[in-house]
Image (cartoon, rainbow, N blue to C red):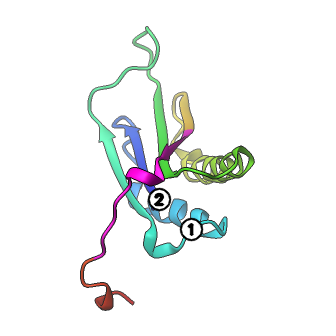
């Protein structure tokens, strides 16, 4: 835990998803709420998407962060704003047209979450 998903529109051709994921992971560790090896992140380029109701060129980058429930709203807000700062810095050179950046925090119920680490001794 946590699970981070970076979704972005495929018209952001120069977006370096791996570099952004690494920066987001570093930001999560820097909050002091997560261990580096517990972060699972992935990126998904969206082939079919729309912003609004016009055919004007727009784009978006959306981060979903799923964390175990129980953190107070002010902690979640601080984490969300830290991730948005990383997105803003990482995407500033992509904006040839309007790009919306957003972060969504999701709670995973602790009682129903299950996790197992296979071959944990191999990880250093």
Q: Please, is residue 64 above or below residue 90 in the view?
A: above
Location of mark 2 (residue): 2
Is residue 122 highlighted in magenta? no
Give the x, y percent position of residue 53: 43, 8
**Residue 114 located within the stretch drawn in magenta:** yes
**Residue visible at 46% across and 30% down?**
59
Q: Position of residue 21 (x, y in %)?
A: 45, 59
Label 2, residues with CA under 10 Å away: few <14, some 14-19, many ≥20: many
| Secondary structure of the residue carrying numbered label 2 | loop
Tell me residue 54's x, y (percent). 43, 9
Residue picked out by circle 1: 34
Query: 104 or 11: which is nearer to us?
Result: 104
Count the marks: how many? 2
Magenta region: 103-117
> First in sequence: mark 1 or mark 2?
2
Foreground residue, 96 or 120? 120
The extreme top residue here reads 53
Residue 88 in the image, given as x and y percentages of width and height: 62, 46
Residue drawn where x is 53% and y is 63% of the image: 23
Q: Residue at x 34, y 25 (%)?
A: 49
SS category of the residue bearing label 1: loop
Picture layout, residue 18 above or below residue 80: below
């Amino acid at each position: 835990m946590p699970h981070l998903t970076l979704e972005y529109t495929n018209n952001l051709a120069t977006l370096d998803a791996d570099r952004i994921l690494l920066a987001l992971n570093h930001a999560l560790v820097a909050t002091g709420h997560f261990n580096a090896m517990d972060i699972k992140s992935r990126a998904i380029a969206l082939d079919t998407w729309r912003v609004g109701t016009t055919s004007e060129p727009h784009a978006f980058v959306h981060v979903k962060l799923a964390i175990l429930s129980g953190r107070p709203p002010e902690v979640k807000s601080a984490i969300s704003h830290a991730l948005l700062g990383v997105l803003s810095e990482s995407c500033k050179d992509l904006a040839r047209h309007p790009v919306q950046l957003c972060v969504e925090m999701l709670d995973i119920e602790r009682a129903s979450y299950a996790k197992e680490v296979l071959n944990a001794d191999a990880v250093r």
